[in-house]
Image (tube, helix red, strand yellow):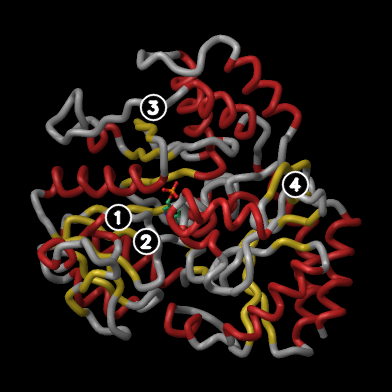
């Protein structure tokens, strides 16, 4: 393993292609995974782990899900992409509309980043306004205007999180504290905001559900001031419920962004909304958006093989499996000052805090303790995301045996 890491660092920047994989937040050497099957990952030495990272939530049925594998193999044999119109794009869009009926028109991309970036361009094109509003701890991919956080709870002009993002661009992003309805109301009383982009269940500062009041305020105030409400459901869509967080809260955004699960584990993103809004995109309208591999047949086929098996009932079954697991885990981990926040099958173990409603709450959690927890789990054959501010996920393939074994590993930590 050490050897694989040494070699990787010779040829890849920091040894990885996405920073969190480098284990900087938890220390130690990243584990190189060789294969997955159901709830398990196997590293390059054949060691087995119960996986709760699940490709950052993109995997819903488990690794190498036989049906998905079969569909992708069959599809690949017919050609991996043509750069032309194909019927499988229509098929996946039609399937998505069963769960998200308000996504009347859909555009597929190759990543969530592209989908959010394009949805924001569309909102700016429609409204003719430049400012966007986001919330601290909300991750919406790595487009320039979204790599911006803020001070505590007050409306502050954005300053970039990353070198290379011009201040002129960051300044167009206003960042507020998550779940702060009053602050959002104040900012939205000014008529210069093109759109609000929000994770209705936050998953990138750990799992932090929005309050109903917060989402209702965003809905009412954007409607009042003529800006668009964008729900970034790249994680929460098809994870927290059939129809996503929007369905769970009964709040309808103007534009919805999806990703992760809808590609069945292959690269994908999508955004959609009312036809009148979406038709402003090229080729019908004047907002340009494109992609060589957008809607590629492999992602479409893999996505369809997953989504076509989902229903309200599926999520009831999944929740029935996870609820007792979370209950027992809460009892066990409380002995070490930890609490669990979850929304459906996504969850985070926070150490040393009572409840997390915003990024500043999450930031107060005990990162050292998480680090110890993470390495204990790793040694014991349980793979958690290598950062205290991420979501863990349970797949449909996690059975009583794996969940039970995980609880035993939690007990040993105590
Ligand atoms: C993962 C994620 C993205 C970015 O998607 P990529 O496919 O990694 O570009 C955007 N928004 C949210 C909420 C995400 O979790």
The label nearer to you, 4 versus 1, is 4
Q: Earlier in the sequence, mark 4 or mark 1?
A: 1
The label nearer to you, 3 versus 4, is 3
Q: Position of residue 13 (x, y in %)?
A: 43, 55
Q: Is residue 155 above or below residue 50?
A: below
Please say whether residue 317 is visible from this viewpoint: no
Tell me the SS state at disc 1. strand
Q: Residue at x 67, y 64 (%)?
A: 384
Q: Earlier in the sequence, mark 3 or mark 1?
A: 1
Tag 2 residue:
198
Q: Are marks 3 and 1 in contact (CB under 8 Å)?
A: no
Q: Earlier in the sequence, mark 3 or mark 2?
A: 2
Q: Position of residue 56 (x, y in %)?
A: 57, 54
Q: CA distance from mark 4 to mark 2?
A: 27 Å
The foreground one among 374 and 200 is: 374
Tag 1 residue:
229
Tell me the SS state at disc 3. loop
Q: Is residue 196 above or below residue 26?
A: above
Q: Residue at x 43, y 78 (%)?
A: 359
Q: Earlier in the sequence, mark 2 or mark 1?
A: 2
Tag 4 residue:
396
Q: Residue at x 47, y 72 (%)?
A: 211
User: Residue 102 appears in which quarter of the rendering?
Assistant: top left
């Amino acid at each position: 393993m050490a050897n694989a890491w040494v070699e990787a660092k010779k040829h890849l920047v920091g040894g990885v292609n996405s920073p969190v994989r480098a284990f900087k937040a938890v220390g130690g050497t990243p584990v190189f995974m060789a294969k997955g099957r159901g709830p398990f990952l196997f590293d390059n030495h054949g060691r087995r782990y119960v996986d709760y990272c699940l490709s950052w939530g993109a995997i819903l049925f488990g690794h190498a899900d036989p049906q998905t594998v079969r569909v992708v193999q069959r599809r690949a044999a017919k050609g991996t992409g043509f750069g032309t119109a194909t019927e499988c794009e229509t098929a996946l869009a039609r399937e998505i509309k069963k769960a998200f009926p308000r996504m009347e028109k859909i555009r597929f991309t190759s990543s969530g980043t592209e989908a959010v970036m394009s949805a924001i361009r569309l909102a700016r094109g429609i409204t003719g306004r430049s400012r966007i509003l986001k919330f601290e701890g909300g991750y919406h991919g790595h487009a320039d205007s979204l790599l911006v956080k803020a001070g505590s709870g007050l409306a502050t002009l954005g300053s970039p999180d990353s070198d290379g993002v011009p201040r002129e661009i960051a300044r167009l992003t206003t960042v507020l504290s998550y779940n702060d309805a009053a602050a959002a109301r104040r900012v939205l009383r000014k008529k210069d905001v093109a759109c609000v982009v929000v994770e209705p269940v936050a998953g990138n500062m750990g799992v932090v559900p929005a309050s109903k009041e917060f989402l209702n305020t965003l809905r009412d105030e954007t409607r009042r001031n003529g800006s668009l409400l964008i729900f970034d459901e790249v994680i929460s869509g098809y994870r927290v419920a059939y129809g996503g967080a929007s369905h769970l809260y009964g709040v309808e955004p103007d534009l919805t962004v999806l990703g992760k699960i809808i590609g069945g584990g292959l690269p994908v993103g999508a955004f959609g909304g009312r036809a009148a809004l979406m038709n402003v995109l090229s080729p019908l309208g004047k907002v340009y958006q494109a992609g060589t591999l957008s809607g590629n047949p492999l992602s479409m086929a893999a996505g369809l093989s997953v989504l076509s098996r989902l229903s309200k009932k599926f999520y009831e079954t999944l929740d029935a499996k996870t609820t007792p697991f979370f209950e027992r885990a809460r009892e066990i981990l409380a002995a070490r000052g930890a609490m669990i926040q979850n929304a459906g099958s996504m969850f985070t173990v926070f150490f040393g805090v009572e409840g997390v409603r915003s990024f500043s709450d999450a930031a107060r959690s005990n990162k050292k303790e998480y680090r110890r927890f993470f390495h204990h789990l790793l040694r014991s054959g349980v793979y958690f995301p290598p950062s205290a501010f991420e979501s863990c996920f349970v797949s449909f393939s996690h059975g009583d045996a794996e969940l039970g074994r995980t609880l035993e590993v939690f007990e040993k930590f105590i």
